[in-house]
Image (cartoon, rainbow, N blue to C red):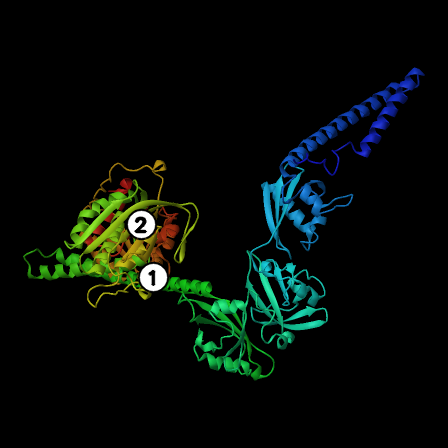
Amino acid sequence: MRSSAPPPVLPPAVPHHGLRWSLLCAAGLLLLGLLAGVTELPLSWLAAAVGAGLLLSGLVAGLLAALRGVQRGILLRRISRVYEFDSASAFLTDTSGEVLWLNAAGRSRYPFTDTPQLSAALTDYAAHPSAVIRRLSARALSEGVTGEDVVTRSGVLRLQVIRCSRAALLWRFDLFVERSSLARGSEGISLPMLMAGKGGAVLYANKALRDLAGGRPRSLEELVPGPLAGSGGIIALNAASGPVQAVMIEVEGAVERREIYFLPLSSLPAIASLQGLEDLPLALLRLGADGTILASNTEAQQMLRLNPGEEINASALFDGPGRPLRDWIADVAAHRAPARTETLRLLRAANPDSFVRLTLRPWGGAARNGLLALLIDATEIRSLQAQFTQSQKMQLVGQLAGGVAHDFNNLLTAISGHCDLLLLNHDALDPEYADLSQIRQNANRAAGLVSQLLAFSRKQTLHAEYLYLQDVVRDMTQLLSRLVGEKVRLDVRHDSGPTLIRADRRQLEQVLMNLVVNARDAMRAEGEIRIRSARVDFEYPRPMGEVSLPAGAYALLTVTDDGPGIAQEALEKIFEPFFTTKPAGEGTGLGLSTAYGIVKQSGGFIFVQNAPDGGAEFSVYLPIHDSDTIDLPLAPAASPQASLPLAREGVILLVEDEAPVRAFAARALRLRGYTVMEAEDGQDALELLNDPDLDVRLFISDVIMHGLEGPAWVRIARQQRPNVPVIFISGYAAETFFDVLADLPGVNFLAKPFSLADLNAAVGTALCDQPDRLS
């Protein structure tokens, strides 16, 4: 049976020595005053009063000190009951680091002197123990609890600090063996190594490095005075016997830790067979001048799937660096080429996308001595590089698509607008009416293609609203059933209750339709398309392919088919515009790219993968909104159709740098009886507004123009005409200009391409919002 906890190292707090002297002086003054009173000396009673006051204050101070001592004793007993037999060393200290109590494990491991300080227990673990104590103490007093790991030669010392009161901290020292290279016996290997922190402080140095440097270095700068080379580079070490040339090898360590090995060049001849380096966490090879592997350690054998003693040429293991690998090795061995690092594909690997970084160093001065090869797994780095390149490519394609779409919208606005004007002068019986209708229909088809490009580049205009995903799918089911035909079955299932999202209903329907059409075309025969909706909650960020979904609640929409699936090379390009696997003439390659852009612009994510049982599966994640905090309309309100009166006093100022668009809009407004003044850019518009007698009732302006852009000249104009409403027109989405237009009230937006009816409705709405300005 365990005995009770021993008493604290230090006794409970007692009154300070200065307090004792104060009490003695007070008692003396009190006694002197009483004696003086008996003998009737002058001021006797005053002295007695002073002494009594001092005695009272001393008694109060003593009482407070005793109370603090009692509180400390209660704290010590509570800590003792919990931590006395803890396997980790536990210390109770004040904020300066003075030890007030320690448990059995601490007493056995850290025999203190008469004045125990916590810094003495950290001397063997940290280069600057006082700094560590100050940093963690301040953090614990502020946050309540904190911790830090200190790498040692025996493993890792985990420090945990808990705030017990405003003046007391509990420390736990938990020493354990880390599952890293340090646990593989780095203390006993002959290769010098160290573990460094983020700031360059040396956290651990093995015996080989301490012997080489003549002691434990405190920082990397102390050991390597010059600039640090990358892994595989040659650096000069500050050794006890003088500078030593060594190959620096850095491997991935723990979080914010640098695990660095040094291979002195002078030791290469002694380890020609890599003896003593078999168990290093480094893949090392010795190559002949022709590329033949002469020796390899255990890590290299596992990485390259080599059998011990197997003789093979390195050219059979790696996909060369754009030139024959044998030639590169021969050039480096003969000092004809610099000993640089190359990223090569690993041929002997289960994963065909495995890569390594290969660094070559000459083994001595002569080419016949061969090379030292250092291998580092670069699969993850290469994957990140490929993902970044793909992301950059998608962004550039999106910018190109958006720019092309903007210019096409200007052309289509002029074509469809003038076509509308011509149709005003022809009825259905005119021979030209059919031709004009064909022009208008094809212009609308072209506008649809441009809209898809804008969707991919996330620059289309979205009319977002709160809606339930399941309602959208249910309303589309009948249309989708007719769309897939009789040979394809459509299975729709909702795995959870209603999920509220915020999106453009028409665009979301377009996403669902595009995914279903893509699934139908992939099967080309009888099969089944499965549509599922569900709610998913992620407590932590969820890695999904090349992105990570933030934590939160999502509405998940999946579309799965029974087709043959998607080839790996096509998966990487599936969302790119104009990419299609269909035969020529059967597809534009814009369906999936449109879905991608709509989902992204709606704040969601879209992924594709091949289903385990065959076919492809597209998954759409859209953020869920809380219905309790949102006022949902009971029914969609019908937008009133604004009518444009036939006559109106005042002037409409039209500012557009595209002459065909300006000509169409001006003529359309004049046909309705308005006086229209035209300006090519913002500067021309401001010059027209210099006339104070000019009564302007409405500004119509393009957003992006040469010189002064639309928002810029409107701000200047509104300094003198603050109540004039504005209609901005643009081929880009209104969301693109939200930040620019945030400080401009009374602004309407009309997206290009717009028709004659669209223009009339927009002008009527803008003027009807200003009833006091109407004639």
Q: Which quadrant of the rendered structure holds the N terminus?
A: top right
Horizontal side, residue 269 vs residue 408: left or right? right
Instruction: State the image quarter where residue 346 is shown.
Output: bottom left
Residue 39: x and y in percent read 94, 16
Residue farthest front in this picture:
1
> Is 434 in front, or is 448?
448
- Mark 2 or mark 1, which is nearer to you? 1
In this rendering, does residue 646 appear at all?
no
In this rendering, does residue 554 appear at all?
yes
Residue at disc 1, secondary structure: helix
Q: What residue type is labelled 2?
A: Asp
Identify whether 254 is placed above or below 57.
Answer: below
Q: Which amino acid does label 1 sit on?
A: Gly
Residue farthest right in this picture:
39
Residue 477: x and y in percent read 20, 47
The residue tagged 2 is 693
- Identified at 68% across, 55% down, the residue is 127
- Identified at 21% across, 47% down, the residue is 476
Of mark 2 and mark 1, the one earlier in the sequence is 1
The residue tagged 1 is 398
Residue 735: x and y in percent read 34, 51
* Callout 2 touching callout 1 (CB < 8 Å): no
Residue at disc 2, secondary structure: loop
